[in-house]
């Protein structure tokens, strides 16, 4: 689908105008959105807009690393959004020219749709230009990273509460590893975007950014905050993982100690039972009338005595 928006010199907002009319002198700036385009519409990138073949190739080959390329008067941006469910990166590209912006995405983009609805307001569009549209798209992409990280922080806080309540260590460990995997996927998107914004605000080739440097610097500050949140959460998951490993080791040691003590108690009892279980003829104790009760009593006293001795030494604590 191809959507077209244009603003005239008289600040009049035009919609769904023919592409050829975008070249008219009365058009102040325009925005063309390639939303899930067909093959015929994709050909317009070359036949009508005359974009560089390498940039068009990057649009078609998913997934490029976030970057910016400069082609004469046109700047080509590759940006990433995050799918809220799978946390997979989704690509959003746009071409920024002297008179307009062309966005391109092979899948529906929530961020582009929100900016489109916002700019669709004539009062908003009249006071903005295509450079500000580029800022709004970038800003919306970055802002939509935050809810996912806030959700992960809530999950980590819940894990800390579960740890205090002595929940299942195995289940919590699996949750920690799932969270670390999610943070890694987010990190692969946020860090390249941070580097891209650094290049944008420090580049002399993108003249349009210089007029709105404070806005793009604000996006860069948000990305710095996101990177700090990611690293902080990764450190927290590492601490939780080490804590769970320690708890698991302590529980294992406690179990092994208990089993060792029980085995130690039964060793002399097993020895006595083994001695009197031998089938020798000349065993005087076998002829005792109370021999059975005497041996059982000795075994009970021996077992109870060893138990009390181990308990006094704190081996059952």
Image (spheres, rainbow, N blue to C red):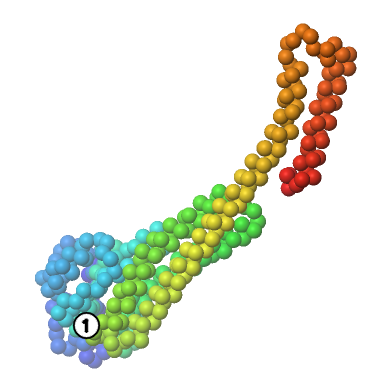
Instruction: Identify the residue at horizontal 71%, vertical 34% (top origin).
Output: 264
Residue 310, position as x, y percentages in the image = 76, 41
| Residue 124 percent location from the top left of the image | 34, 85
Which residue occupies the foreground of this view, 286 or 209? Answer: 286
The residue closer to the viewer here, 180 or 316, is 316
Is the residue 210 above or below the residue 46 in the image? below
**Is residue 162 left or right of 138 when viewed as pictured?**
right
If the image is split into quadrants, where does the N terminus sit?
A: bottom left
Name the residue: 72% across, 25% down: 270
Residue projecting furthest to the right: 289
Q: Please, what secondary structure does the residue beneath circle 1 have?
A: loop
User: Which image quadrant for residue 14?
Assistant: bottom left
Give coordinates of residue 74: x percent, y percent: 18, 78
Give the residue at mark 1: 205
State how many labels appear: 1
What residue lies at 75% left-to-right and 27% top-to-bottom?
Answer: 269
The image shows residue 126, relative to residue 50, as above or below, that is: below
Q: Position of residue 78 (x, y in %)?
A: 26, 70
Among the 4 quarters of the image, the one containing residue 290: top right
User: Residue reaching furthest bottom?
Assistant: 10
Q: Quadrant of residue 257?
A: top right
User: Which residue is outermost to the top?
Assistant: 281
In the image, taking residue 10 as reference, residue 110 lies left or right, namely right
Q: Residue at x 19, y 86 (%)?
A: 27
Q: Residues within 10 Å of mark 1 (few under 14, many from 20)?
A: few
Q: Is residue 10 visible?
A: yes
Of residues 51 and 191, the one nearer the viewer is 191
Q: Is residue 134 visible?
A: no
């Amino acid at each position: 689908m191809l959507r077209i928006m244009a603003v005239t010199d008289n600040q009049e907002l035009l919609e769904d105008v023919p592409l050829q009319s975008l070249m008219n002198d009365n058009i102040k700036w325009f925005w063309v959105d390639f939303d899930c385009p067909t093959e015929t519409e994709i050909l317009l990138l070359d036949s009508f807009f005359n974009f560089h073949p390498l940039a068009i190739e990057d649009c078609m080959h998913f997934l490029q690393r976030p970057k910016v390329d400069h082609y004469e008067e046109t700047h080509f941006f590759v940006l990433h959004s995050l799918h809220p469910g799978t946390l997979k990166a989704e690509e959003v590209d746009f071409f920024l020219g002297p008179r307009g912006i062309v966005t391109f995405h092979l899948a529906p983009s929530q961020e582009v749709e929100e900016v489109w609805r916002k700019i669709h307001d004539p009062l908003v569009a009249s006071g903005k230009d295509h450079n500000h549209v580029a800022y709004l798209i970038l800003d919306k992409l970055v802002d939509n990273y935050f809810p996912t990280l806030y959700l992960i922080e809530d999950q980590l806080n819940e894990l800390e509460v579960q740890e205090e309540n002595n929940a299942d260590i195995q289940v919590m460990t699996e949750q920690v590893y799932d969270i670390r995997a999610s943070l890694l996927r987010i990190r692969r998107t946020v860090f390249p975007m941070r580097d891209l914004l650094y290049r944008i605000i420090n580049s002399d080739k993108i003249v349009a950014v210089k007029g709105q440097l404070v806005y793009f610097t604000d996006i860069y500050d948000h990305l710095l905050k996101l990177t700090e949140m990611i690293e902080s959460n990764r450190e927290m998951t590492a601490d939780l993982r080490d804590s769970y490993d320690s708890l698991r080791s302590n529980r294992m040691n406690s179990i092994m100690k208990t089993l060792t003590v029980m085995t130690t108690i039964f060793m002399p009892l097993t020895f006595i039972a083994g001695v009197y279980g031998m089938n020798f003829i000349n065993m005087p104790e076998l002829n005792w009338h109370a021999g059975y009760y005497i041996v059982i009593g000795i075994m009970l006293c021996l077992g109870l005595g060893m138990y009390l001795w181990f308990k006094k030494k704190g081996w059952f604590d």
